[in-house]
Image (cartoon, rainbow, N blue to C red):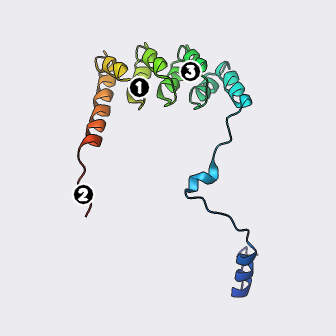
Amino acid sequence: MSCIRFNTPAQRRQLAASAPTMAAPSEPVAQFLSPAVTASKIARIRRLAVDPDPRIRESAALSYHAPTEVYEALATDPVVSVRACVARNEHTPCDTLRALARDESEIVRAWVAINYFVPADAMEQLAADPSETVQRLVAWKASLAEDADAPQPALV
């Protein structure tokens, strides 16, 4: 048995006429907005941040809505991957990123180096990092900024 439907033009018009009308938002993404941040969501992030499983703590570290004290606590987590998640999160406070720029792990410092919102003083510190990888990432990020500042050719 086939699942292909052969509707007549009249049936297709009737189906189109009976379809619910929806106001199309200006941006398709607007149809999939996240739910509002509530006190219960913040409480859930706090619970995730103290979970024994580091993968669960990583998800808390990547949250855009974690309170400052959660980022600060996770920035001192014994597991490198959790600290790396804090370092790569664009919503991590600047003071926490400054602290992570001095982290013992090259991986964490590398994530701080490519975080778009890292403070300039932390970037200067990372430019002199003992790790060649971190130094290269700082240089790469600086080259991106130079490319963005360069005049763009006019489109014809």
Q: Nearer the viewer, mark 3 or mark 2?
A: 2
Q: Residue at x 74, y 81 (%)?
A: 14
- Nearest to the eye among marks 2 and 1: give it: 2
Image-based side of 80 in relation to 135, left or right: right
Is there any visible trace of residue 6 in the rendered image? no
The location of residue 54, given as percent across then percent down, is 61, 22
Quarter residue 21 falls in: bottom right
Image quarter (top left, top right, bottom left or bottom right) of the C terminus:
bottom left
Query: What residue would you read off at disc 2?
Result: 154
Q: Residues within 10 Å of mark 1 (few under 14, many from 20)?
A: many
Mark number displayed over residue 38: none
Q: What is the distance, in whole Å, between disc 1 and disc 3 at their CAs?
A: 14 Å
Does the CB distance between marks 3 and 2 fall below 8 Å?
Answer: no
What amino acid type should be assigned to the residue bearing mark 2? Ala
Check disc 1 and report the residue beneath it.
118
- Quarter of the image with the N terminus in it: bottom right
Please tell me which residue is depicted at 66% across the width and 18% down the height of the picture: 50
Position of 96 with respect to 151 (left or right) is right
**Which residue does the numbered mark 3 point to in the structure image?**
71
Which x, y percent locates residue 121?
34, 19
Q: CA distance from mark 3 to mark 2?
A: 43 Å
Q: Earlier in the sequence, mark 3 or mark 2?
A: 3
